[in-house]
Amino acid sequence: MNLLFDLDGTLTNPALGITGCILHALERLEFGALPRREELHWCIGPPLRDSFAQLLETEDERLIEEAVALYRERFADVGLFENEVYHDIPGGLASLRDAGHQMWVATSKPHVYAQRIVEHFGLLDFFQGVYGSELSGENVHKRDLIAHILKSEKLESEAVWMIGDRAQDIVGAQANELRTIGVLWGFGDQAELEGVRSEFVVDSMAELIRVVGADHV
């Protein structure tokens, strides 16, 4: 089977880095009273530009791009490594690989950052490739990114699962007729994942392995 894995909230916990970089941007923009880190967890997963538009309550593209640039100012060298791999991910990925599954990373995060993160945390060898958005914003939405992966890798939708922790992962997969698994160790909850009708919702890597293991590789 072919498995697409989201990165943030699925393979790694990036909360410290992402929230720190958002706060950096807001402070530089003289936003005012800054939110607490935990109040920014909803920003982990959705496209960054969408999050800043909501945070700043604006549709001003110039302001949004300025916020993104300030975020990346800190993220490129510091924030991307303020991150940690969920403890059972390496063992789970090894089991899936050994069972014959092929795996790719599919993240809205820019590819230039995603590649560095996956490599830094020793996960690169588990994957056939790492796909992300462009810095320009191209393929930032999961629907478009997944379509790009299917075309690039010559994969048939019915033979691909999308695995992620947020509604965007599931909705993007459904738009491309993929099967879906929502995971509960990230930043989406049961209600969010069931609300978008994820085919499966699992709370551990062991359960995820059982779900995909039920299908022929």
Image (spheres, rainbow, N blue to C red):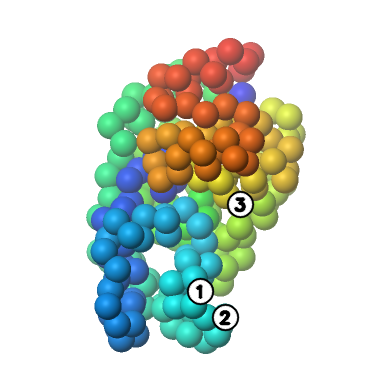
Residue 51 located left or right of residue 32: right
Vertical placement of residue 133 versus 5, above or below: below
| Viewer-closest of 135 and 43 | 43
Near-viewer residue (153 or 212): 212
User: Which quarter of the figure is the N terminus placed in?
Assistant: top right
Q: Circle 2 sits on which residue?
A: 59
Q: CB atoms at circles 2 and 3 under 8 Å apart?
A: no
Pointer 3 local density, CA inside 10 Å: few below 14, some 14–19, many at least 20: many
> Cα distance, mark 3 to mark 1?
18 Å
**Looking at numbered disc 3 in the image, what kind of residue is underneath it?**
Lys
Name the amino acid type tagged 1. Ala
Task: State how far apart marks 2 and 3 are (Cα).
Answer: 21 Å
Assess whether mark 2 and mark 1 are in contact (beta carbons under 8 angstroms): yes
**Residue 145 point in image, percent of width and height:** 63, 53
Task: Tell me which numbered mark, 3 or 1, is placed earlier along the sequence.
Answer: 1
Can residue 21 be seen by looking at this rendering? yes
Q: Which mark is residue 53?
A: 1
Q: In front here: 127 or 108?
A: 108
Q: From the image, tell me which residue sits under label 3.
A: 142
Q: Earlier in the sequence, mark 2 or mark 3?
A: 2
Q: Judge the density around disc 1: few (<14), some (14-19), many (≥20) Cα neighbours within 10 Å.
A: some
- SS for callout 3: helix
Mark 2 closeness class: few <14, some 14–19, many ≥20 residues within 10 Å: few
Question: What is the x, y in percent for residue 55?
Answer: 43, 72
**Amino acid type at image mark 2:** Glu
Question: Can residue 163 be seen in the rendering of this structure?
Answer: no
* Res 90 → quadrant: top left
Residue beneath the point at 52% across and 29% down? 201
The answer to which image quadrant residue 34 occupies is: bottom left
Judge whether 178 appears above or below 27 on screen: above
User: How far is disc 1 from disc 2 in space, using C-alphas?
Assistant: 6 Å
